[in-house]
Amino acid sequence: MILALETSCDDTCAALVSDDGLIAANVISSQGLLHARYGGVVPEVASRRHLEVIDAVTADALERAEVTLDDVDRVAVTRGPGLIGALLVGVSSAKALAAARGLPLTPVDHLHGHVVASTLGEDPIEAPYICLVASGGHTFIARVDDPGSYAVLGQSLDDAAGEAFDKGARLLGLGYPGGPEIDRLAAQGDPDAFDLPRSAPGTGLDFSFSGVKTALLYAVRDLGEAAVAKRRADLAASYQRAIVTALVARTAQAIGREKVARLAIGGGVAANSELRARLRELGGELGIRVWTPPIELCTDNAAMIGAAARFTDPVPYPDYLTLDAAARLA
Ligand code: KG4
Ligand code: ZN
């Protein structure tokens, strides 16, 4: 049994994952409301809240899994990338839990977690597969030949897709985080109402979302406040359509190029209803299988950190006592 902790951004998470990838508990304590009034995550506020709740979240996960620390064989924790102060809470806590029992500790790359989220559960994906990861901080397409690692085939050259959703939502006067707000509102709008750029320039597998964001900014300016208020749903639907179309186009290109018959998605934007539907459609068109994990495995969670730990060599006690969190990983 693996006890996994994740505190890289604004969710305090603890999970118990068995060695065969079954989730015994996956507890997520979201700080969303705490940061909403600032319109984004405030790093110092995030670290303090992690510190306040990490022990309770861990205890809750153990209780839900109906196990105790005696049943835990190793501890896993997100080492980076993320907010350094936030990461440190998880890393220190994981070290303390592991060291007190002399257990091994597995430091995990947060993005590796998103890439292997679909290896969890009763119907795990198997390598080789292509994975589209779209979160608040990162957007990339990876090829996985062995779940212990991943090769990035293309990535965003500017904003991450989630960042584009959040910034677009702010332009439209919606709350934070913006992705779910746009997703909800877009369902009532016309995605063809506004002509926003839907593809990144170039022929590679890289993304660019700064153009669509600027196009929305101009559209909002040209319309003026009253018209924006009336057409908010159309703007949200058109904006979402542009981002999703770019994500789907590059993913289709990657599958064609790599000739791999399995696709997974991960990251907070993988919770987007239009993206999930369009990728399932794409799977049908191309005759490939698509894994769209449940929402709680797309947005930040500790089960995916446990998943990555299954495929990563643990560090024995006491070697990890000098382990540090890292805001960026090489
Ligand atoms: O993976 P995640 O939970 O945290 C990071 O590692 O960044 O992703 C958070 C991002 C936010 O930008 C949020 O707006 C976006 O995921 N997101 C969505 C949806 N749910 C969350 N974007 C579009 N549609 C959604 N339904
Ligand atoms: Zn994430």
Image: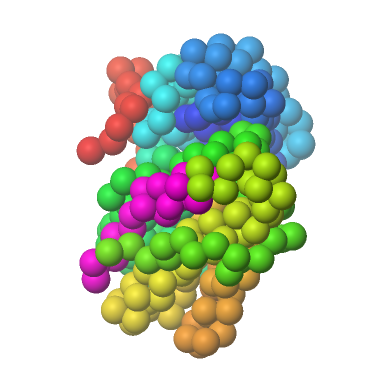
Q: Quadrant of residue 64?
A: top right
Camera-side residue: 280 or 304?
A: 280
Q: Which color scheme is applied?
A: rainbow
Q: Is residue 28 above or below residue 236?
A: above
Q: Quadrant of the C terminus?
A: top left
Q: Is residue 150 visible?
A: no
Above or below 115: residue 103: above
Question: Where is residue 167 drawn, in percent x and y?
Answer: 50, 39
**Magenta span:** 202-220
* Residue nearest the viewer, comparing 294 with 145: 294
Q: Position of residue 230 (x, y in %)?
A: 71, 50
Q: Viewed as shown, does residue 191 lie left or right of 287? A: right
Q: Is residue 282 visible?
A: yes
Q: Identify the residue at image location x=29%, y=60%.
A: 206
Residue, x 57% and y 48% (percent of image)? 223
x 59%, y 30%: residue: 11
Q: Is residue 34 magenta?
A: no
Most foreground residue, 21 or 237: 237
Q: Residue at x 64, y 26 (%)?
A: 36
Is residue 219 one of those drawn in magenta?
yes
Quadrant in which the N terminus appears: top right
